[in-house]
Amino acid sequence: MTGAPGFWDDAANAGKVMNKIKRLKNSVEPWKELKAQIEDIEALYELSLESGEQGEEAEIRSQLEETQKKYESESRMSLLSDWAFMLSRMYSRWAERRGFKLETVDLLEAEGGIKSVTFQIDGDYVYGFLKGEAGIHRLVRISPFDANARRHTSFASVYVFPVLDDTIEVKIDPKDLRVDTYRSGGKGGQHVNKTDSAVRFTHLPTGIVVACDSERSQLMNRATAMSILKSKLYEYYKQEKEKENSKYSAEKKDISWGNQIRSYVFQPYTMVKDLRTRAETGNIQAVMDGDIDQFIEAYLNAMWKGLPLDAEDDGEGAQ
């Protein structure tokens, strides 16, 4: 790539590419070193078995412990690299645990991670389970890149809406819709998508934007994007009506930066705390691996009992 004719003519672009290569190399090299260390340990273990000597056991254990610590450190770095990715994985694993079908409808990548992702999850009562997850999710950590070990905070917004069936009609005036098509991403080589199959709908009166690029057929992407748009419009107009009737309850607040519903603290201690129900756990790794049923159940129980669900600040802000 860097050897291509004219690459260095555009200094600004060349600099961006080189920085990206450097970041990718820095993220890959530690894992290559870990792989080499594991292979060395395996070779030492096999030699000790062949020789029948027990003297290498202490050395093997020492190297294993060192490699384990390095693996855990690199795993944490990877885990903390992108909060949106971490949350998307959490919900993916939750759906997998439940036996629900999950499909990635739209994925917008950003430098080093995910900017936004849209999932469609199919299963019994799945919307009922997940509707309480809508809101702002806050990550609190000591940045591994900060030499002063200061606490940093990241935010990601989760929006949950039901997929409408054919019994609910949402009318959309074609004049209110802007349609854009573009080339969806591919794996390269013979699999690259050479047609403008991806679809983006913009509903002009509300500003709602949806996109789909999961299928190779533009027709299928249009159908999926339209289904999502109708679902979002249904929720939008439903909430607008509830506002007008003064029935817009606290648990259905607009998703905004002031409405954090849950904090995930990785350092200097570990804790996940729901700021509405006060449900919490110290096993943050299990939560990030999809074990969020305790928070879902706490929310549903509070809803059933009619308890207030106003989120309170837990004080875990940035420093």
Image: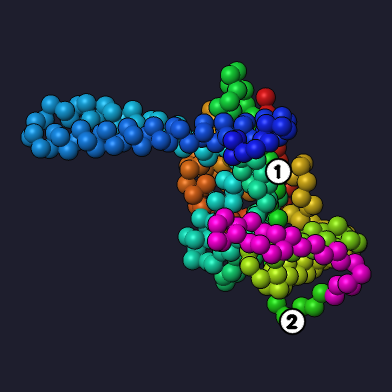
Furthest residue to the bottom?
A: 167
Which is more toward the observer, 23 or 61? Answer: 23
Which is more toward the observer, 186 or 242? Answer: 186
**Image quarter in which the N terminus is found:** top right
Furthest residue to the front?
A: 5
Q: Secondary structure at mark 1?
A: strand
Furthest residue to the top?
A: 148
Looking at the image, residue 268 lies above or below residue 165:
above
Q: Is residue 173 magenta?
A: yes
Q: Is residue 25 left or right of residue 59?
A: right
> Of the residues shown, which amino acid type is indicated by label 1?
Gln
Q: Residue at x 68, y 40 (%)?
A: 155
Which region shows up in magenta? 171-196
Looking at the image, residue 143 lies above or below residue 181:
above
- From the image, tell me which residue sits under label 1: 260
Q: Position of residue 317 (x, y in %)?
A: 68, 31
Q: Residue at x 71, y 32 (%)?
A: 9
Q: Position of residue 190 (x, y in %)?
A: 55, 61
Q: Position of residue 210 (x, y in %)?
A: 75, 61
Q: Nearer the viewer, mark 2 or mark 1?
A: 2
Q: Quadrant of residue 315?
A: top right
Cα separation, mark 2 vs mark 1, equals: 34 Å
> Of the residues shown, which amino acid type is indicated by label 2?
Thr
- From the image, tell me which residue sits under label 2: 167
